[in-house]
Amino acid sequence: VEIVESGGGSVQPGGSLTLSCTASGFAFSSVITSWYRQAPGKEREFVASTLHGGRSTHYADVARGRFTISRDNFKSTVWLEMTNLEPDDTAVYYCNVQTYNKSEYWGQGTQVIVSS
């Protein structure tokens, strides 16, 4: 199995970024996909998730209204569209895949820096 994130970078406050995560080796339509993030000196925290069909989504309070998670099961890809970014959004963002038997897999992370 392999999970590869991309799309991170540096952006000014108020800007936008879209992260991408492609997972191979999974029955992708049956997994739960989530985004987490870890800021320097802080624990990893949940950002957003979407269930198998992509219609059911869940967001952390910090993401609700600014971030949108979506997925395409045919492409085995999940995205996190982030808008109105703030300096506190600076973190390494990780893609998480949870299979039907509760096994979890992580990508290597992609860095997001929000700074003027």
Image (spheres, helix red, strand yellow):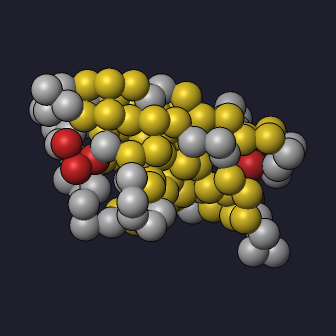
Q: Is residue 58 above or below residue 77?
A: below
| Residue pictured at 32% horizontal, 24% vertical | 10
The one nearer the camera, 58 or 18, is: 18
Position of residue 19 in the picture relative to residue 78 (left or right): left
| Residue pictured at 13% horizontal, 32% vertical | 14
Residue 13 lies, in percent from the top left, at: 14, 32
- The quarter in which the N terminus is drawn is top right
Q: Residue furthest front?
A: 41
Residue 112 lies, in percent from the top left, at: 38, 35
Looking at the rendered structure, the number of numbered marks drawn on it comes to 0
| Residue pictured at 40% horizontal, 30% vertical | 18
Q: Quadrant of residue 63?
A: bottom left
- The quarter in which the C terminus is drawn is top left
| Residue pictured at 47% horizontal, 63% vertical | 44
Q: Residue furthest bottom?
A: 101
Q: Is residue 54 among what the camera can see? A: no
Residue 100 lies, in percent from the top left, at: 77, 70
Q: Is residue 9 among what the camera can see? A: yes
Position of residue 103 in the picture relative to residue 114 (left or right): right
Residue 32 lies, in percent from the top left, at: 63, 61
Q: Is residue 35 above or below residue 84?
A: below
Q: Quadrant of residue 83?
A: top left
The one nearer the camera, 90 or 102, is: 90
The one nearer the camera, 22 or 72, is: 22
Position of residue 9 in the picture relative to residue 55 (left or right): left
Q: Is residue 18 above or below residue 57?
A: above
Position of residue 4 in the picture relative to residue 116 (left or right): right
